[in-house]
Amino acid sequence: MNRKQLLVGLVLASLFGGIVALGGYKLFEKDKPSYIQTLPNSNVQFSNYLNDTSFVVPEGLNFVYAAEIVTPRVVHIKSTMSLTARDNPYSSPFDDMFRDFFGDPREYRGQQRPAQSAGSGVIISDNGYIATNNHVIKDAEEIEVTLYDNRTYPATLIGTDPNTDIAVIKIDEDKLPFIKFGNSDNVRVGEWVLAVGNPFELTSTVTAGIVSAKGRNIGILRERYGIESFIQTDAAVNPGNSGGALVNLKGELIGINTAIATPTGSYAGYSFAVPVSLVKKVVEDLMEYGMVQRAVLGIEIVNVNDPRLEEDIDDLKGVYVNSVYENSAAEEAGLKKGDIILKINDTDVTNVAELQDLVARNRPGDKINVTYKRDGKTKTVSAKLKNLDNNIEIVKRDDAYAIEGASFRNATENELKEYDAEAGVIIENIGAGKWKDAGIEDGFLITSINRRSVKDVNELRAMLQNRTGDGILIKGKYPDSDKEVYYGMGW
């Protein structure tokens, strides 16, 4: 073989080897698992794809579809409020009470300074209704909403529910993209989820994680009737994410991100969201009535493994009934102390948080089936739920309110001038009850409850319904008097 033939042979061998290598690569490429495949360019789209119904969720683990669906539906919220020396979170809870009675020598007492808080919200209707956390807009004098496309609007507060930390605000706009509600009951531990919000002013941030637990109670809501049945995830959530969306890989809302477990104030591994099953009911009530229609069974309950229980429980399933309130829905249904509730309707109950969540999804007057165990036997009864006033009336947001033998109404502008006050609620028609027993007389203008200013009847109602402790401190004025008067009243 001469040198020319040898050269041609080497060239042919090289070409053959390249073809074999390329063919082998293509062969192995077909066997690559779908979760590391590269998306075709046709699936990388801008936000104007949202009405394209031909778009299909790619197979395998993929966050792109949900992220692109959700981010235009999550907004940035800025709340502006005024803080004073009284708002110092590090002062003693009794400091202000003593200052109100005995005065404060410090010159800066009562001086106001502007402050801002930031959070997130989720568009829930095309005409501008937005769900967020109550703590995002609490005490806000101005609320500003910035959309995904940087349009900015002032927002109006529609209603709040401190018991679930959910609030609804509204902007004056229509034809907005809004999020689709999923079903948080179908969410499973281990399922992938995305958290979408605005942490540290970093707008439209998406993080991923899995559902770590459900029905989690972390003791963060200090309200007397607070409901904590959080979805726990390990998706990164930081300050500014509050009120944002927790979604599944279909882009459906399954929760409102609310809290984090942290020793530092920043994300440290776990975050918590209000399940959408509860969010949906709360926002519907706030939009329709201006306040939540809270349904209760009228029982005190503890987990069956609670160390405070005196009796031994062999089967650690369900929730223990520690007491039943008089004339409550539970008493009328025949429930008794010592019963162990196993199910609400067809859903198993494993802890207090789950039971509270399942009951709170209903309105006063609704009927639920309660399955319980007593003396080793399992029974099911129907209970007609009541409200916090122990009846089935729908409570609407209005300008009048009556409770414990007294009636309340908003003060008119002329009356506020007469009382030399900026806002307040007038108490009148005082009959037998707590208010009369406290020594309060007709015509008293209530300006604050427990050191929190009372602007109108709706705030008064919310404060009384969400009160904590066994008593309240009432501050106000009588007409034609410059002196502020204080009353203490047990509850």
Image: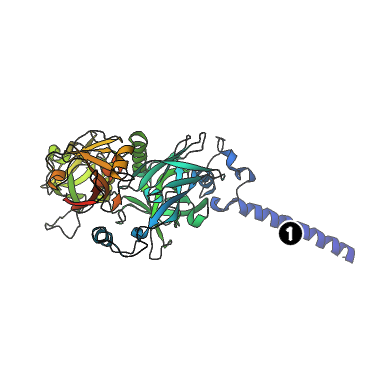
Task: Indicate left or right for 475 with 283 as reference.
Answer: left
Q: Position of residue 258 (x, y in %)?
A: 39, 52
Picture layout, residue 8 above or below residue 275: below
Q: Nearer the viewer, residue 288 or 438?
A: 438
Q: Residue furthest left?
A: 375
Density class for disc 1 (Cα within 10 Å; few <14, some 14-19, many ≥20) is few
Q: Nearer the viewer, residue 181 or 482?
A: 482
Name the residue at 37% across, 62% down.
108
Give the labeled residue for mark 1: 17
Q: Position of residue 29 (x, y in %)?
A: 62, 53
Amino acid type shown at disc 1: Gly
Residue 106 seen anywhere in this rendered image of the structure: yes
Quarter of the image where the N terminus is located: bottom right
Name the residue at 54% across, 40% down.
56
Task: Indicate left or right for 165 with 66 as reference.
Answer: left
User: Quadrant location of residue 115?
Assistant: bottom left
The image's colouring method is rainbow
Q: Nearer the viewer, residue 129 or 138?
A: 138
User: Quadrant location of residue 385?
Assistant: top left
Q: Position of residue 31 (x, y in %)?
A: 58, 52
Label 1: element kind: helix
